[in-house]
Image (cartoon, helix red, strand yellow):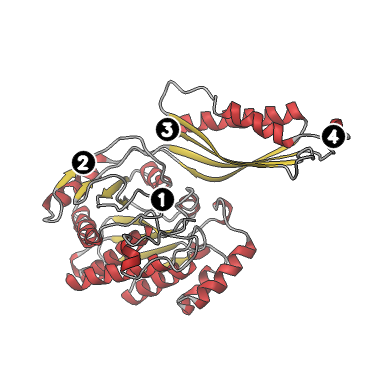
Amino acid sequence: MQQLGDKLIKWRRDFHQYPETGFLEMRTASIVASILDELGFQLKMGKEVMSEADCMGKPTEEETKKHYQWAQKNGAIGDYLHLFSEGYTGIVATLDTGKKGSVIAFRFDMDALDILESNSNEHFPRNEEFSSKVHGKMHACGHDSHTAMGLGLATLLIENKDQLKGKIKLIFQPAEEGTRGAKAMAAANVVEDVDYFVATHIGVGVPHKQFVAANSGFLATSKLDISYTGKAAHAGGSPEQGKNALLAAAASVLSLHGISRHSGGATRINVGQLEAGAGRNIIANHASMKVETRGETSEINEYVKEQVTSIVSGAATMYQVEHKIKTVGEALSCKCSLDLAGILHQCAEASPDIEKSRLEDNTPGGSEDATYFMNEVQKNGGKATYCVFGTELAAGHHNEKFDIKEDTLLPAVNILFQSAKVIMEQ
């Protein structure tokens, strides 16, 4: 086991040094695929496991080509890299034991964030020389750890194949950040045959050496890019000839933050970015906003999204400008299957490395697009849960000083493996 523990840390630190953001996880995916292939998994990759029409917020073709060239020069595995060259970086690895049984799937996300990593003397990755080598990008949410955990689980499954039955799928998902990647994989039917589905995360406020078997507090969300197009004019000489996109955007911002709350549950709205205009003496002919909505349920989020559409359209009419709304990310709400979560809870309680395990936590928080997989499995009569392995964090998620305790990795892999064995006996 110590050998596997060392591998987990080695994998995690390698992925940490070479962070890749959503739909650009080419180096990461090529390494993951090569290891899984060598272990003996059946692999489906790229467009085989991703619906092109359902990819949201995908980088431009130029950005994708540029990153492909970067991956070639920075340790990507050439035999697999070409499969991800267009930015469809999902992987589904299947272990078929050849014995009749259930189909179990585990999901692991791979993407990083657009954050400049801390260079502080107190920052553990800096001191251990595995800080990000990519300026302005960082694994600040733990997905490097998740990817390593997926490979660790794959290793244990192969080593103990004779004890297993049924099929096990390991889903390595791109673009969880911004809730962009899971919908495309779910739409490609990667979980249509799955009886039991488990997604996992490290940290998220759960204390070190503690475990939550069912985190059902995720809010449904929509990520929206909104633009206004007007007509430029001289602000002093002929302002009446202009169509002011900036004013339309400003009016929208104020109205969006005034959307009525919903009696059915919690709602959120945020305009995180607003850009407009070209100069002091020019009537602004363009404006753009980055907006997100959230709701305690998918229905409540849809209510907020509809209000956004109405407000944005109304402001465009009021200022006689054109507008566009593009959905670049989305996630659903979901409730975990507590009978499945109970299995993970029991396995965690039996682990000598877990001091406290909780069956469920419904505290509203962020959003997660693993809910697309969960809803699909549950719709087909299966069971799904989202579990959290607690760890001591150097700073909160999405922070430049983010880091985890690496002694969390091996116990997490062991609990996932033990849960797979128990599930197979159901």
Q: What SS does tag 4 mark?
A: loop
Q: What SS does tag 3 mark?
A: loop
Judge left or right: residue 127 versus residue 419: right
Q: Which residue is mark 4?
A: 236
Distance, label 4 to label 3, CA atoms, is 49 Å
Judge left or right: residue 199 versus residue 352: right
Mark identifier at residue 297? 3
Judge left or right: residue 30 versus residue 157: right
Q: What SS does tag 2 mark?
A: loop
Q: Which residue is mark 1?
A: 398
Q: As displayed, is residue 25 above or below residue 328? A: below
Query: Residue 41: where, in percent of width, then height?
Result: 34, 70
Binning the other alpha carbons within 10 Å of mark 3 as few (below 14), some (14 to 19) or many (20 upward) gives many
Residues under numbered marks 2 and 1 in contact, where contact means CB atoms less than 8 Å apart: no
Distance, label 3 to label 1, CA atoms, is 24 Å
Q: Residue at position x 63%, y 63% from top?
A: 61
Q: Residue at position x 79%, y 40% from top?
A: 282
- Amino acid carrying mark 1 in the image: His
Distance, label 2 to label 1, CA atoms, is 26 Å
Query: Residue 280: where, in percent of width, then height?
Result: 75, 41
- Amino acid carrying mark 4 in the image: Gly
Q: Which residue is mark 2?
A: 359
The answer, for residue 169, to whether it is visible in the render is no
- Amino acid carrying mark 3 in the image: Thr
Q: What SS does tag 1 mark?
A: loop
Which residue is more in the foreground, 210 or 348? 210
Q: Residue at position x 15%, y 46% from top?
A: 356
Query: Residue 101: where, in percent of width, then height?
Result: 26, 57
Mark 2 or mark 4, which has the lower sequence index?
Answer: 4
Distance, label 2 to label 4, CA atoms, is 65 Å
- The image quarter containing residue 64 is bottom right
